[in-house]
Image: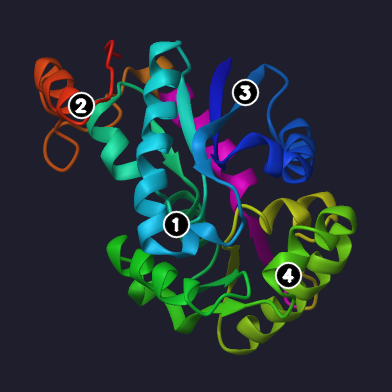
Amino acid sequence: MASLCYVNITEEEPSLPYLTIVQKVFDQVARADTKIDIKSVKPGLSRAFDPIYSYFALLNKVAIIDKIIEADREGYDAAIVGCFFDPGVREAREIVNIPVIGLAESTMLFACLLGHRFAVVTINERKGIPEVENLIRLYGLESRAITNPVRTIDMPTIEVFTKGMEHPEIVAADILEQSKKCVADGAEAIAVGCNGLGPLCTVSNVVEVEESHTPILDCVSVAIKVAETVVDSRKALGIPIPSRAGLYKGPKEKDIKRVRTLFGRNYSGC
């Protein structure tokens, strides 16, 4: 059994059409004994394209981490951050005692299990391409990605989160077409690189490029399965997650409280 918290990185009300799709994915993908609750940031961003701007993302990251702290305090087994840019994942791992799963990290690493080279298909925002390219480098996966590994769909972002929520098959068809081009350029696995795009593939049953049997990976679905596996491993084997040996060595509780107080943020501990 696993209790997961899915952190929605935009406020709840403008996210409702998307969250309806995501709930369908939860119901389809998660085990029967897995409980997934959604926590939306508040205050937080309200538009789908806001997170591509670094300044907006920085302001939003604090709210994301607060929700992860809340999930830890409330006894969830793991938290999933619902954005392919993995905002707040590294920072939160320092200060909470539960696994924190990022969509990009988990999906790209999973893609490496399925094929020698992968590509990422994401939203039609040129500014988002270098953000994902930076993540590929950060996670040490440059040698596993094809040349020009980040490709975009044709549909404008605003249409994805309006028309696409009502007709997910249209968006999924666009993703499939871009995936075929990636396969032609050497990709053996495709990571759908947006929390808004991936679920549209799952509910439309677009899971592969059929001609080559190349997997198309919904980042939300992958993150759920990875979270379940990490929780199971921790419970069954007693593995410490995350490691506290280096990058994720955290500050002392008193120092977390002290520094958060400096910035006017309450902290009651994890």
Identity, as a three-letter code, of the amino acid under mark 2: Arg
The tag on residue 260 is: 2
Question: Percent position (x, y) of residue 115?
Answer: 53, 67
Name the image quarter holding the C terminus. Answer: top left
The tag on residue 10 is: none
Q: Callout 1 environment at 10 Å: few (<14), some (14 to 19), or many (20+)? A: many
| Chain-order first, disc 3 or disc 2 | 3
Judge whether residue 208 can be spotted in this image. Answer: no
Label 4 to label 1: alpha-carbon separation: 27 Å
Question: Percent position (x, y) of residue 259?
Answer: 13, 28
Identity, as a three-letter code, of the amino acid under mark 1: Phe
Is 265 placed above or below 217 here?
above
Choose between 132 and 69: the one closer to the eye: 69
Q: Callout 4 environment at 10 Å: few (<14), some (14 to 19), or many (20+)? A: few
Which residue does the numbered mark 1 point to in the structure image? 85
Question: Which residue lies at the image location 32% right of the left edge and 60% below the top edge?
Answer: 139
Which residue does the numbered mark 4 point to in the structure image? 213
Magenta span of residues: 212-233
Label 1 to label 2: alpha-carbon separation: 24 Å
Label 4 to label 2: alpha-carbon separation: 49 Å
Q: Nearer the viewer, mark 4 or mark 1?
A: 1
Identity, as a three-letter code, of the amino acid under mark 4: His
Which residue does the numbered mark 3 point to in the structure image? 37
Is 3 placed above or below 144 here?
above
Identity, as a three-letter code, of the amino acid under mark 3: Asp
